[in-house]
Image (cartoon, helix red, strand yellow):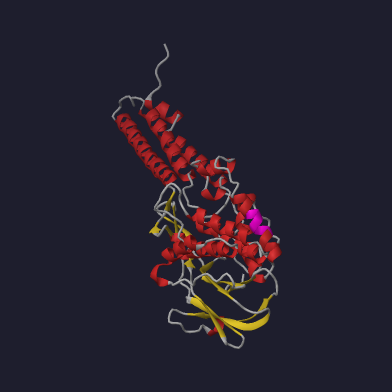
Amino acid sequence: MTSRPSAIERRSAFSPVRALAFLGLAGTGFLSGGCVSEVPEHRGGGTVADRQVPVPERDRVLFDYRIAATALRRGDDAVAKEKLDDAIARIGGIIANSADAARARSLFSAESSKVFIGEPYERTMAYFYRGILYWRDGQPDNARACFRSGQVIDSDPTNEHYDADYVLLDYLDGLATAKLGGDGSDAFARAQRNAGERLALAPYQPAANVLVFAEFGYGPRKYAAGQHGELLRFYADDSPSRSARLLLDGGTKIVPLPAFDDLGFQATTRGGRVMDHILGNKAVFKAGANVAGDIALAGSAIAHEKSRRREREGKDTDDSDFAAVGLGVLGMIGKVASAATDATADTRQWDNLPQRLSFAAIELPAGQHPGRIEFLDRDGNVLEQRTQTITLNVAAADRDTVVFLSELKR
């Protein structure tokens, strides 16, 4: 008759400590093997095209955004249009059930692994810039379509409290309508309602043949907050440039350029309400798996200690060793699952956006109009180092002259 192995023999043959040590090493190897390096975000001068940096497909829209903004400021309309058209086609054609979106929704995939299309304020700016370029090409109808698309992106059809609240988009919508022979009064009224008492909008002047778009300050930044970095939040360093003015023809003509919109406000609110983006499902799973792992490992330690105590007393271990191993396995699975769950918010960002947007429509005779643009602080003082010398070339044509002025260099 075969005798039953003693507690000491069973313990030496299958030690929970050894098993847990092995699982720990395996878990460490699993996690270290899962690290992935990503292309760093472009923040230097010039464009990505200049540096010939390979762009991952999931980041293509992001790089389109950045290159387009730089090209527009350099006066390279062809590149700006090419990149904006590519981005808009992609953000308008993203399928919610695509493989990338499904992978991003999974518990073990980072939000940054999905195809980037940007937050509402980023997508809105793509349409805003494209609208400027359409108007410059003599297509105010297409420009208006872009401004209206931006309004839709900034709104939430499922929540009536999240209506679009860009002042400039509505104002330009109405101006384009007026220039096309329609009635832009409804859009003007919406714009004035959103502007409130801080800004009295100029009535439309369909005869104004020069449209001046201006931008100043540096736009919002994203950062991850929360225990697991699951909260996507925004901040914007308030730029000293609070407004601008255009001085033409030896200072005889002064054109005010107040701030219509603030992208910092647009990033941190929807319909004027402060908001946070929360990836709660991943954060809850990560925390729950971690706690479950702690409980299981604690149970494993208790079972192992019970086995040793019975062993010292000369009693049968009552399979406590095997219970310790089982709980240890569950504990390690929980800890590994928690560590592998990436709840971090996606902080990829269109990092060369402005903070404030401005506009003016004026009437000028054809020809060259030398002048300068001055940026003003909150008290109306000129920020001398930011002043730029410009020349407006007004064409004698049946289309508006569209001028784009930026405090930003890239």
Res 138 quadrant in image:
bottom right
Where is the N terminus found, in terms of image quarters?
top left
Task: Name which residue lies at 46% across and 28% down.
Answer: 13
Is residue 221 visible in the rendered image? The answer is: no
Instruction: For the C terminus, give its image quadrant.
Output: bottom right
Which range is magenta? 82-87
Residue found farthest to the top = 1
Residue 357 is situated, as x and y percent measured from the top left of the image, at: 52, 69
Q: Residue at x 40, y 21 (%)?
A: 5
> Exactly how many numbered labels are in the figure?
0
Name the foreground residue: 232 vs 390: 390
Seen at 57% across and 52% down, the residue is 117
Question: Is 288 placed left or right of 68 in the picture?
Answer: left
Q: Is residue 314 above or below residue 240?
A: above
Q: Nearer the viewer, residue 259 or 305?
A: 259
Measured as percent of width and height from the top left, residue 205 is found at 55, 71
Q: Residue 123 sits in which quadrant?
A: bottom right
Residue 402 at x, y percent in the picture: 63, 70
In terms of depth relative to the viewer, which is nearer, 404 or 227? Answer: 404
- Image vertical order of residue 351 relative to residue 202, above or below: above
Task: Find the residue positioned furthest to the left.
Answer: 313
- Residue 219: horizontal and vertical position, in percent? 51, 66
- Please, is residue 26 above or below residue 214 in the view? above
| Viewer can see residue 85 | yes
Instruction: Give the prevailing secondary structure in the magenta stretch.
Output: helix
- In the image, what residue occupies the spot 37% across and 36% down? 296
Please give left or right for residue 294 compared with residue 241 in the image.
left
Residue 217 part of the magenta segment: no
Residue 91 is left or right of residue 75, and the answer is left
